[in-house]
């Protein structure tokens, strides 16, 4: 995620762009910058840090410009890696949101031709390709440029000699603001609402040219098209949440995109780290809260796909364990990269001689300085305190790593690995199908909102999902909940089962299914309301008070789908109870104390 803004018109370009960028800071704030056209060339200001850190020096008044607020993906947050980027002649400039998969190959080619690069980013190749393709018409150059690039992009380009902006979109959002004698373009509507409520959403493959007088749009077949102008009814705050009432709900709905971004470029080969450098005889996962639950799920994935024995430790307890004789490869999960318990565990793991890898969502966060290797999830900023899309993308990284290691170890052959990868590709669509069922899922929560205690039970790889479902309900709905291995219920918690104690049972058709059916029957016999989330089954329908069936998938991928249902259950229960969903009491997004 990054935020981009472009403007052409008669207002103060710098003011329009900076104000727009401020509205997009939720999309990232690692660096910020603007580029404004002048007769002498393109005037640029860019800097690591927030938009307010940009200097207030006078910008020559001109009628077109672009701006960017960055969520770092390729290249750490720094002045050099900040957008906009310039071509070699200082005549063209671009901002980009997305990931260019084939940037390495393009960069090598352009360097060979004499182009000089000033950053480590994937985005900079776009402006040099534009320069290479430019023969007097920026739109034609952009068309040629996007034929070369693979990946996701929202790009806006400006040139020295014209007030026009040209833009292109593929898998990253871009919306045009329609004004009178002025036009805008941005990653999201909040950036436009101070100036206009009339917008045109671009579609994948669209290219557009904006001047102060008009907007022209071409579709992916390069046919000139009309995109409907919509009138936005939201105010700015609603718009930052894209119309969702809470960031948490928005982030739940962003999961198909987050999965897509996280697998992008990693399915052909996992090049984030040189795996051959390390010993993967044994692995340990360390994390806190939801990230620890991703680790627990990961243990089953690693053991099945790569036959690598795994242990999982909660960060705050790791230091009290005795160092084993071996030094397991240690993977630390932290959405924020700032959780002090996990940072301390990373130091301790190093002290014990382990090789360490951090999986985090925040570029250049503190944990990245403590470990040997870093892999970034591509979830985009997560604002709601409850972790949702970052759990999903952490688990995606685990699948990708396990498949790669399984292939290297010969545990998986190519066909099998491809089968798993195909299913990964299908997951975004399956998550969307669950999100389309939100009303059905919401209906279950009437009972949960009245409960004092709720149990979540699962077996095998869905046992940690039960833990995660319980954590989400406690955290945002303030309903006491406990996750249990289904088989353990009879060893104590059964004493708490009454007609007022709902049990959410996760029933997936793997080798534990028959046993799970038995557990569901035992719970129902105690008169507890049973709500089942899992694979479609007649017996489940008979035994349960409520059943929600997830789209068909391989059992190993079921945790991701089941968990989305549990996120919605927690959200709607909290909503019914009127809780402060994005900022639950006593909690913080990053826990920087031990
Ligand atoms: O940033 P981290 O992933 O290290 O955070 C770990 C936990 O604090 C976090 O997952 C917490 O449990 C969430 N609020 C749960 O939704």
Image (cartoon, grey):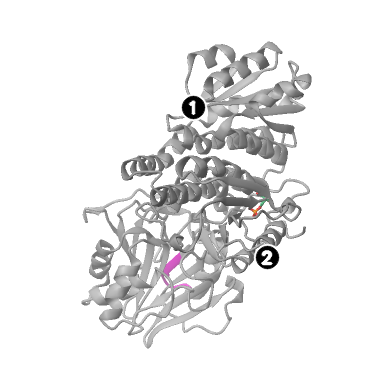
Quarter of the picture containing the C terminus is bottom right
Residue displayed at 40% across by 68% down: 122
Which tag, 2 or 1, sits closer to the chain's start? 2
Q: Where is residue 359 in the image (x, y as percent from the top left)?
A: 55, 57
Q: Residues within 10 Å of mark 1 (few under 14, many from 20)?
A: some
Q: What element carries label 2?
A: helix
Magenta-drawn segment: 5-11
Question: Which residue does the numbered mark 2 point to in the structure image?
Answer: 351
Residue situated in front as seen by the camera: 202 or 524: 524
Q: Is residue 6 magenta?
A: yes
Residue situated in front as seen by the camera: 111 or 95: 111
Q: Does the magenta stretch include residue 71?
A: no
Q: In this view, does 409 lie to the left or right of 446?
A: left
Q: Residues within 10 Å of mark 2 (few under 14, many from 20)?
A: few
Disc number lying in front (2 or 1) = 2
Visible residue check, residue 90: yes
Question: Which residue does the numbered mark 1 point to in the structure image?
Answer: 510
Q: Position of residue 322 (x, y in %)?
A: 73, 53
Image quadrant where residue 355 sits: bottom right
């Amino acid at each position: 995620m990054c935020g981009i803004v472009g403007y052409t018109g008669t207002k103060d370009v710098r003011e329009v762009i900076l104000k727009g960028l401020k509205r997009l800071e939720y999309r990232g704030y690692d660096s910020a910058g603007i580029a404004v056209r002048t007769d002498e060339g393109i005037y640029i200001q860019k800097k690591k840090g927030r938009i307010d850190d940009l200097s207030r020096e006078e910008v020559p008044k001109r009628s077109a410009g672009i701006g960017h607020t960055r969520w770092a993906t390729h290249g750490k947050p720094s002045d050099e890696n900040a957008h906009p980027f310039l071509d070699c002649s200082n005549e063209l400039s671009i901002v980009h949101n997305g990931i260019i998969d084939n940037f390495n190959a393009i960069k090598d080619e352009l360097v060979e031709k004499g182009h000089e690069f000033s950053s480590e980013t994937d985005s900079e190749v776009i402006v040099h390709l534009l320069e290479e393709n430019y023969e007097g018409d920026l739109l034609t150059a952009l068309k040629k440029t996007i034929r070369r690039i693979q990946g996701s992009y929202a790009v806006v380009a400006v040139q020295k000699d014209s007030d026009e902006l040209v833009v292109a979109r593929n898998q990253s959002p871009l919306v045009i603001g329609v004004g009178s004698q002025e036009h805008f373009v941005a990653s999201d509507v909040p950036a436009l609402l101070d100036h206009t409520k009339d917008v045109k959403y671009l579609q994948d493959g669209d290219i557009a040219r904006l001047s102060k007088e008009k907007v022209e749009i071409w579709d992916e077949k390069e046919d000139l098209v009309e995109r409907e102008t919509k009138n936005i009814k939201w105010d700015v705050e609603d718009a930052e949440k894209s119309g969702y009432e809470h960031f948490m709900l928005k982030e739940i709905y962003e999961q198909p995109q987050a999965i897509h971004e996280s697998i992008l470029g990693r399915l052909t080969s996992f090049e984030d780290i040189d795996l051959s450098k390390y010993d993967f005889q044994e692995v340990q996962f360390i994390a806190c809260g939801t990230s620890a639950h991703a680790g627990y799920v990961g243990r089953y994935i690693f053991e099945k796909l790569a036959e690598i024995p795994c242990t999982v430790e909660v960060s705050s307890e790791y230091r009290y364990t005795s160092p084993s004789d071996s030094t397991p490869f240690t993977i630390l999960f932290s959405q924020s990269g700032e959780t002090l318990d996990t940072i301390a565990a990373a130091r301790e793991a190093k002290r014990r001689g382990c090789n360490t890898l951090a999986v985090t969502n925040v570029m250049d966060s503190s944990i990245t300085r403590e470990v040997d290797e870093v892999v970034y999830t591509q979830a985009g900023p997560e604002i709601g305190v409850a972790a949702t899309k970052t759990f999903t993308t952490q688990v995606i990284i685990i699948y990708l790593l396990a498949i790669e290691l399984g292939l290297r170890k010969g545990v998986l052959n190519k066909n099998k690995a491809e089968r798993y990868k195909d299913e990964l590709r299908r997951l975004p669509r399956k998550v969307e199908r669950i999100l389309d069922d939100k009303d059905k899922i919401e209906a279950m929560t009437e009972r949960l909102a009245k409960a004092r205690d709720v149990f979540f039970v699962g077996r095998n790889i869905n046992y940690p999902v039960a833990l995660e479902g319980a954590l989400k309900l406690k955290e945002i709905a303030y309903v006491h909940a406990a996750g249990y291995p289904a088989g353990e219920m009879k060893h104590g918690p059964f004493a708490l089962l009454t007609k007022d104690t709902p049990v959410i049972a996760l029933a997936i058709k793997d080798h534990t299914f028959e046993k799970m059916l038995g557990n569901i029957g035992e719970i129902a016999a105690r008169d507890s309301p049973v709500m089942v989330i899992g694979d479609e089954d007649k017996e489940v329908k008979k035994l349960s008070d409520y059943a929600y069936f997830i789209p068909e998938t391989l059992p190993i991928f079921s945790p991701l789908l089941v968990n989305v249902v549990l996120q919605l259950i927690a959200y709607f229960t909290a909503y019914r109870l009127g809780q402060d969903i994005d900022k639950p009491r006593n909690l913080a997004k990053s826990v920087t104390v031990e």
